[in-house]
């Protein structure tokens, strides 16, 4: 019997209309845990680097985390993996909600989609019965609307649906896959789903998920639950409100937005408005939010209420979470009311809440600069809010200028030319980033931004404070009950880290400590992305209920595989290195690994180069950021090393080959 | 008829306003009642069901009650603070009109037993796992008429008798026991 996992994947070939249930190799669970790890393994094995994102040979994998469908609190993430039309690298985006547990109960760990359907279809998975069904009637429908229609026509109110909207159908490079209040939206994976002409996947499952050592497992789950309660009752002191408590940032519950509005950049990631947050604004926004948010809601088996049901007199009800309430607001230099209004529509169209507002603000900047003209934007209203709505409609339909903007700021700027490139200033690896423009280089964040394979900072950071505590007292109090650290020396890093003076950024934490801190943060995310535990109860947070000391035991008790701290750390490193190798095979090199030039005002090129050198060494990469044969061998990834050698990406024992392979050139 | 006796009555108060829709109650219920205990889980076997329709702001946990052989005429609608509920939504019965409160494979009825356990649980598991306190456990003393209730096996068998007839059930039991 298989434990925690079902032991089966569903293989669907949309070109041929073929569906197969395929047993998986349990050894792969030991090596890669599951979720993102096993997704990556499949992509390495089956999608060669020549395959373009919009090719029938590209795979789109919906992987349930290993612990999804077990009682592990907050284990509900679906990890969607494919190759991104925007970055041309591996894209993995994750969604919470209810999809992954339902898929496990239907008897599958993953749905692997290949090929391209001749017509728009949806997939209906009902335990052992799986059908590809016509979706002609769903063409152009919104993502939530689609889910409702499917549930009704199947007469199955308990079916869980993941769907694309119009943006996915039209292959917008930042189209999302939407599932209730959750979405897998980064990297344009909704565009790949649209390219496969797959409108939605609906799933219903009524089978058991088994646990290897039940008594121990439930004891650990109860401990986690108790600690969650403790953490919520004892917020971390000295940090912004959304970082003080667990959950995906509690944007639906908390109305105090001083931190976001004062520290994040407005417009096209341009302007800091340090005096924006006044009492007047606070009162107004509080009122708007309390009217709009009808109820706080959660994902499957999680007590944290990160989502909200949004009800607005001019809108259909929808669900929202996290920072998307502010991305449109701030990009349009508008207010919260506007944010709530446009986000609902954007969700129905199925677009990413980070990239979309930035693309629109970018377009308006180009217009102000005279690079886009009235001819390009004929018919656009004169007010900013109206322009955002107008642009959204053009983008999701790829109409006129929308067809260019639908490719994101990086590609759009190159298509438009005339100096537009300078306005696409906030991307890493061609992907729009959080609108943050800060003063002094932070070495920890420098490495995470530069090297993170997720290309999205919120899915890399966590565990370690984002900034030094203001006073020694706060630092001492913080480390007092910080048992989550992998080693006591991390406490010292926090104790010694000061806002100013010798032991402050950019030279403290030291390069060595920075590597360790980044490695720890990254490791915890890689573990979560394999188990399906939400970062909001785990790796994103300071002092989370899941940590390196209890996770090996939790995974072993659930899945019945032998795992200790070293074993789990090794598996996380294996997954991380494999994804690096996948991207390296697609051309990723050191020169791609840099934050936006203006992310910090004060930059330190020499220090940055040393940080990258040391971090690469620490991770077992060479100077170009390519995993070395030795480190691949250590991880049992010899076959990866051999492949990189055959392709001339690695050379046998000698120094690195030139890092000039064409990530930047792309394949357009 | 039974005699009047003082009895501890176990009650779960359900506060719909506090429900966050996470279904932890279903998860832990099915896990607790698995054989071996916590050895598997499956909300489809849960003795509590969350009727969940977020776009209508409907979040309604319902507990499994008695098995019934026939469906009733309840097809009415309730509108409560602008939200429409079906009459069935509030019903505890394991009945032929719906899938809820039946084992998904055998179709045998399920019923909430307040997590009877040895040693006893302080509170039913669904309450323990509901950190948002939508489910609140209360005990009170009441004078009640004592009655003999059929146990689970009996209730299950009765449902099979209703469905297939006594003869077929007896034949099957005899056949199974002869197989040893």
Image (cartoon, rainbow, N blue to C red):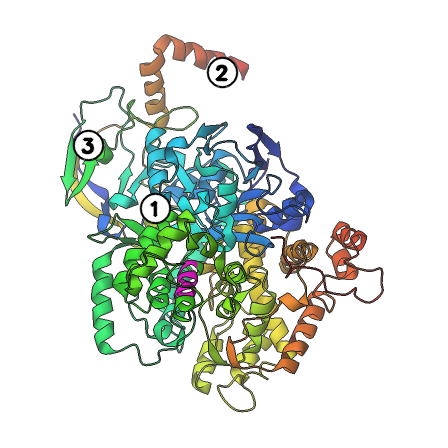
Q: CA distance from mark 3 to mark 1?
A: 24 Å
Give the chain letter at badge 1: B
Q: Which residue is mark 3?
A: B87
Q: Is residue B139 visible?
A: yes
Instruction: Indicate the position of residue A470 as horizontal and vertical percent values.
Output: 43, 85
Mark 3 touches mark 1? (CB < 8 Å): no
Residue A259: x percent and y percent? 36, 74
In the picture of the structure, the residue carrying the numbered disc 1 is: B126
Question: Quarter of the image holding residue A373?
Answer: bottom left
Give the structural element (helix, strand or loop) at label 1. Answer: helix
Indicate whether A609 appears above or below B67: below
Which labelled disc corresponds to residue B177?
A: 2
For the residues carrying marks 3 and 2, which lies nearer the camera in this image? 3
The residue lying toward the viewer, choosing from A289 and B165, is: A289
Relative side of A284 to A434, left or right: left
**Pointer 2 or 1: first along the chain:** 1
* Residue A324 is one of the magenta-drawn residues: no
Q: Judge by depth and name the residue closer to the eye, A176 or A292.
A: A176
Both labels 3 and 1 in a single chain: yes
> What residue lies at 60% left-to-right and 75% top-to-bottom?
A514
Chain under disc 2: B
Location of residue A660 by image quarter:
bottom right
Identify the element where label 2 is drawn. Answer: helix
Q: Is residue A362 magenta?
A: yes
Question: How far, Cα to Cα, is label 3 from label 2?
Answer: 42 Å
């Amino acid at each position: 019997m298989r434990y925690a996992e079902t032991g089966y994947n569903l293989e669907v070939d949309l070109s041929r209309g073929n569906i197969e249930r395929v047993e998986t190799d349990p050894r792969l669970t030991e090596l890669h845990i599951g979720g993102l790890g096993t997704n990556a393994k499949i992509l390495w094995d089956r999608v060669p680097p020549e395959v373009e994102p919009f090719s029938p040979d590209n795979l789109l994998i919906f992987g349930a985390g290993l612990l999804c469908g077990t009682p592990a609190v907050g284990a509900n993430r679906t990890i969607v993996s494919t190759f991104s039309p925007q970055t041309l690298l591996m894209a993995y985006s994750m969604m919470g909600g209810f999809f992954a547990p339902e898929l496990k109960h239907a008897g599958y760990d993953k749905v692997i989609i290949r090929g391209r359907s001749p017509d728009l279809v949806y997939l209906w998975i009902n335990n052992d019965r799986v059908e590809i069904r016509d979706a002609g009637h769903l063409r152009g429908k919104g993502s939530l609307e689609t889910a409702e229609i499917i549930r009704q026509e199947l007469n199955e109110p308990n079916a869980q649906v993941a769907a694309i909207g119009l943006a996915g159908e039209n292959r917008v490079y930042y189209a999302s896959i939407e599932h209730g209040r959750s979405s897998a939206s980064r990297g344009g994976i909704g565009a790949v789903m649209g390219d496969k002409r797959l409108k939605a996947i609906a799933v219903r499952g009524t089978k058991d998920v088994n646990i290897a050592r039940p008594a121990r497992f439930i004891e650990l789950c109860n401990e986690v639950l108790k600690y969650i309660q403790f953490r919520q009752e004892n917020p971390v002191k000295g940090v912004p409100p959304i970082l003080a408590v667990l959950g995906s940032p509690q944007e639906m519950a908390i109305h105090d937005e001083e931190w976001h509005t004062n520290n994040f950049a407005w417009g096209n990631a341009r302007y800091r408005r340090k005096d924006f947050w006044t009492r007047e604004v606070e009162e107004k926004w509080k009122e708007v939010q309390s009217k709009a948010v009808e109820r706080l809601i959660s994902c499957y088996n999680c007590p944290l209420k990160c989502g909200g049901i949004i009800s607005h007199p001019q809108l259909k009800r929808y669900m929202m979470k996290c920072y998307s309430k502010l991305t449109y607001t701030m990009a349009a230099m508008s207010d919260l009311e506007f944010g709530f209004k446009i986000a609902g529509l954007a969700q129905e169209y199925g677009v990413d809440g980070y990239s979309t507002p930035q693309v629109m603000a970018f377009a308006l900047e180009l217009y102000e600069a005279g690079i886009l003209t009235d001819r390009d934007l004929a018919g656009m209203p004169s007010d900013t809010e109206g322009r955002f709505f107008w642009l959204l409609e053009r983008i999701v339909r790829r109409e006129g200028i929308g067809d260019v903007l639908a490719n994101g700021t990086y590609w759009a700027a190159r298509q438009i030319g005339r100096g537009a490139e300078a306005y696409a200033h906030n991307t890493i690896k061609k992907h729009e980033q959080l609108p943050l423009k800060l003063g002094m280089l932070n070495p920890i964040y420098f490495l995470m931004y530069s090297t993170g394979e997720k290309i999205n900072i919120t899915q890399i950071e966590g565990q370690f404070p984002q900034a030094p505590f203001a006073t020694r007292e706060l630092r001492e109090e913080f480390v007092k009950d910080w048992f989550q650290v992998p080693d006591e020396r991390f406490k010292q890093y926090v104790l010694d880290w000061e806002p100013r003076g010798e032991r402050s950024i950019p030279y403290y934490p030291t390069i060595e400590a920075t590597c360790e801190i980044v490695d720890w943060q990254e490791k915890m995310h890689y573990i979560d992305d394999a188990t399906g535990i939400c970062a909001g109860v785990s790796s994103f947070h300071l002092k989370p209920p899941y940590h390196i000391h209890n996770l090996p035991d939790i995974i072993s008790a659930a899945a019945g595989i032998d795992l200790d701290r070293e074993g789990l750390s090794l598996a996380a490193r294996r997954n991380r290195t494999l994804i690096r190798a996948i991207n390296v095979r697609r051309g990723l090199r050191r020169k791609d690994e840099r934050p936006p030039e203006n992310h910090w005002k004060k930059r330190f090129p020499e220090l940055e180069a040393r940080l990258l050198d040391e971090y690469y060494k620490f991770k077992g990469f060479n100077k170009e950021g390519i995993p070395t044969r030795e480190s691949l061998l250590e991880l049992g990834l010899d076959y990866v090393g051999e492949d990189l050698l055959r392709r001339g990406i690695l050379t046998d024992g000698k120094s690195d080959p030139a890092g000039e392979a064409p990530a930047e050139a792309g394949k357009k | 008829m039974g005699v009047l006796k003082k009895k501890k009555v176990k009650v779960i108060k359900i506060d719909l306003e506090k429900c966050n829709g996470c279904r932890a109650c279903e998860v832990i219920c099915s896990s607790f009642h698995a054989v071996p205990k916590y050895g598997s889980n499956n909300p489809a076997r849960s003795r509590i069901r969350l009727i969940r329709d977020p776009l209508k702001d409907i979040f309604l946990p319902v507990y499994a009650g008695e098995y019934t052989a026939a469906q009733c005429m309840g097809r009415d609608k309730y509108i409560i603070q602008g939200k429409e509920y079906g009459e069935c939504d509030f019903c505890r019965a394991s009945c032929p009109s719906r899938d809820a409160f039946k084992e998904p494979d055998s179709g045998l009825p399920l019923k909430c037993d307040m997590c009877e356990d040895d040693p006893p649980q302080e509170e039913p598991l669904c309450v323990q796992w509901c950190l948002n306190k939508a489910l609140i456990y209360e005990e009170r003393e009441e004078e009640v008429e004592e009655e003999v209730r059929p146990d689970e096996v009996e209730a299950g068998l009765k449902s099979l008798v209703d469905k297939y007839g006594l003869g077929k059930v007896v034949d099957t039991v005899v056949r199974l026991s002869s197989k040893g």
